Image (cartoon, helix red, strand yellow):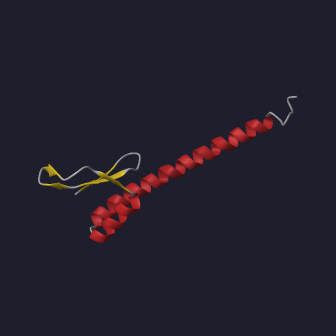
């Protein structure tokens, strides 16, 4: 079994037997991967998955913060234009 995470926080699981792949990779959620690692009990795997999830969580929070600043700037620019009726 191979579990892969991409830069955009997509997780996939693929199963192989020897060199032969057993079907196509299947997309799974990060929380399901984390639960599976905890079930397996491999501390190294748990730490690796948690590290990837924590980094994705931090990146998402940074994006939220950036978009919030952009929204506030746009609101301020709109307010500076005034609320004039264009009739």
> In the image, what residue occupies the spot 33% across and 69% down?
38
> In the image, what residue occupies the spot 64% across and 41% down?
70
| Foreground of the two, 73 or 36 | 36
Give the left or right position of residue 20, taking residue 77 as reference: left
Q: Does residue 53 show up?
A: yes
Q: Quadrant of the N terminus?
A: bottom left
Residue 30 occupies which quadrant of the picture? bottom left
Residue 78 occupies which quadrant of the picture? top right
- For the view shown, which residue lies furthest in the left direction? 18
- Tally of numbered discs: 0
| Foreground of the two, 68 or 17 | 17
Q: Quadrant of the C terminus?
A: top right
| Foreground of the two, 38 or 21 | 21
> In the image, what residue occupies the spot 85% across and 29% down?
86
Give the left or right position of residue 11, taking residue 75 as reference: left
> In the image, what residue occupies the spot 63% across and 47% down?
68
Q: Does residue 41 show up?
A: no
- For the view shown, which residue lies furthest in the front direction? 23
Residue 47 occupies which quadrant of the picture? bottom left
Q: Position of residue 24 (x, y in %)?
A: 25, 49
Q: Position of residue 31 (x, y in %)?
A: 40, 62
Q: Position of residue 57 (x, y in %)?
A: 47, 55
- For the view shown, which residue lies furthest in the top direction? 87
């Amino acid at each position: 079994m191979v579990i892969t995470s991409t830069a955009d926080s997509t997780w996939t699981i693929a199963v192989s037997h020897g060199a032969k792949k057993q079907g196509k990779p299947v997309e799974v959620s990060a929380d399901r991967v984390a639960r599976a690692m905890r079930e397996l009990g491999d501390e190294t795997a748990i730490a690796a998955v948690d590290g990837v999830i924590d980094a994705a969580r931090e990146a998402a929070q940074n994006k939220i913060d950036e978009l919030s600043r952009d929204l506030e700037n746009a609101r301020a620019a709109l307010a500076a234009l005034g609320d004039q009726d264009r009739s």
